[in-house]
Structure formats: structure tokens, C-alpha cells
Image (cartoon, rainbow, N blue to C red):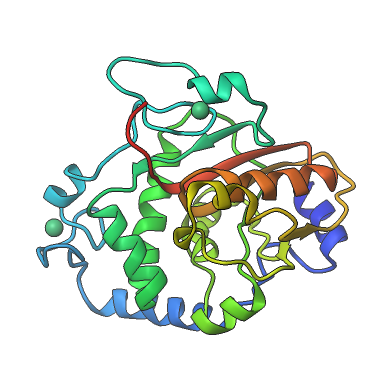
Amino acid sequence: MVNRLLTGIFGKPPGTVNPGASAMIAVGAAGLQRLLLPPTCLLCGADGALGRDLCAGCAADLPRNHTACPGCAIPLAGSQNGFCAKCQAEPRSFARTFAPFRYQPPVDFLIRGLKFEGRLSHARLLGELFAAALAERTEPLPDCIIPVPLHPRRLRERGFNQALELARAAAARFRIPLLATGLRRVRYTTPQTRLDAHHRQTNPLGAFASGRWEIRLRVALIDDVMTTGSTVGECARVLRAGGVNEVEVWALGRTGASV
Ligand SMILES: [Zn+2]
Ligand SMILES: [Zn+2]
């Protein structure tokens, strides 16, 4: 049903919308390579486990974000649970956040290798780990997944959108439409990593645009890393202004010391 309605909105079947054709070809080549070569740990070179390019030992050492605020996924110290002080004090444009890993070694290494060295094998592994973490949850799945978009200029420079590549495994495993063009970035912005805390808050404002959504949708907005939450917050605000009913944020890694 949702598939048919989304098809009506977008004019072609959801899940086939893809601005990164070169990335798709590369992912296809990676899939072929996987058929020919046994999985090998990207971190230590040992044999991969569970069909992934990660060995059992390295998988056990991954920095899971088990105790985190359900609103913004900031790591919580000790035995705390519930919403962090910031989420309790300020309204958010998104309902909750799921970020299964902390942005610490080796997750930061894998994400940086993907973004800055074009290592799509990292996207495949991280995407599979994210999908496996999603399978452990009990929350209902969204109607569709929308990646935080890159500006067309940066997409040309990089050749792929890392958020879209990270979303592929979850979309395929749970059969959720992946709407690559559900949001557009209409203003070229300075990378958040080059800005201080104040400018990170204001930098994404006005940078995104959404079409008009005529059906009530629950959207998962996916990004690689969540730091201050200002980028996903602005994306979620724009989606909801366009008629989306509820936005949940998904991020591979969450920065921030425990609060
Ligand atoms: Zn390993
Ligand atoms: Zn919070």
C-alpha cells in the first residue's frame, strides 16, 4: 500500500530512485567480488564471521551505544536511562534516534575510510551491522528511509552519498522503500567538522528542501554520524513541514562523551 502511494508521489517505484549510479555499479562489483572471495576482516585481515568482512573478535570489540538517550542517542553514563537533560528541556523535530555505535575506534576509522577514501566495502560492512542492530529492536519499522542528502556539487566530488550507501542493507533486509531523493540539499554548506559548536547549529538552516507529502508517513532519516543533531534536526523539520507525520533519526555512529 505504502509502496503504491509512494510510487504515486514519485512517479516511479521507490527504491529505484538513485542519483549515484557509479556507486551502484561499484556496490554491484563488490557483491560480485564477495561471491569469489571469502569474507575477510577489514580491521585485522582474519577470516570474516557471519558472512561479513569482520572477524568475531573485532565484532565483539565494537563500541556499542547500548545506554543512550532514546531522543538523541547521546551516550549516557553509568546506569542512567530515559531522556537526557537536553531532550527534556528542548523540543526536537524528530521523535527519537537510533545510533547503535559510538563514534570511536574502529567505527570512526570505517566511516572515514568510506567518506574520504571511497571505500565502499566499509559501507557494505557498516550497513550490514546497522541492519543487524535494527533487527534486535522491538520498535515498529518506518514506512520509508530517506538519506541525508549531499549537495549535488559534493555528490559529484565524492561520487556517492555515504548515507544512501549505509541505508541499502537495512532497506533490502526489511523491504523498506529507500527514497534517495526524498530530501534535497539546496544550499552548499561548510562541512560541520570544520565548524565550532555555535556555527554547527546555524550552518544547516535553510540547506534542505522537501516535496509535499500527501500521505501520513513515518520516515527514518539516515546519516553516517550524528554529532550535535543540528543537521538531522533541520532535515526532520523540513520533512515535517512538508507533511511527514513522524521522523526517526538513524545514524551509524554517535559522537559525544557520556552525559
Ligand atoms: Zn578482525
Ligand atoms: Zn537526548
User: Looking at the image, is 94 positioned above or below residue 81?
Assistant: below
User: Looking at the image, is 109 positioned above or below residue 154?
Assistant: above
Asked whether residue 124 appears in the rendered view, the answer is yes
Residue 107 at x, y percent in the picture: 29, 53
- The quadrant of the picture occupied by the C terminus is top left
Residue 3 at x, y percent in the picture: 75, 53
* Residue lying at 30% horizontally and 62% vertically, measured from the top left: 110
User: Looking at the image, is 51 positioned above or below residue 73?
Assistant: below
Q: Nearer the viewer, residue 1 or 208?
A: 208
* Residue lying at 23% horizontally and 54% vertically, measured from the top left: 106
Q: Nearer the viewer, residue 6 or 58?
A: 58
Would you say 79 lies left or right of 208 here? left
Q: Nearer the viewer, residue 221 or 91?
A: 91
* Residue lying at 42% horizontally and 57% vertically, measured from the top left: 127
Residue 71 at x, y percent in the picture: 54, 28
Would you say 57 lies left or right of 124 here? left
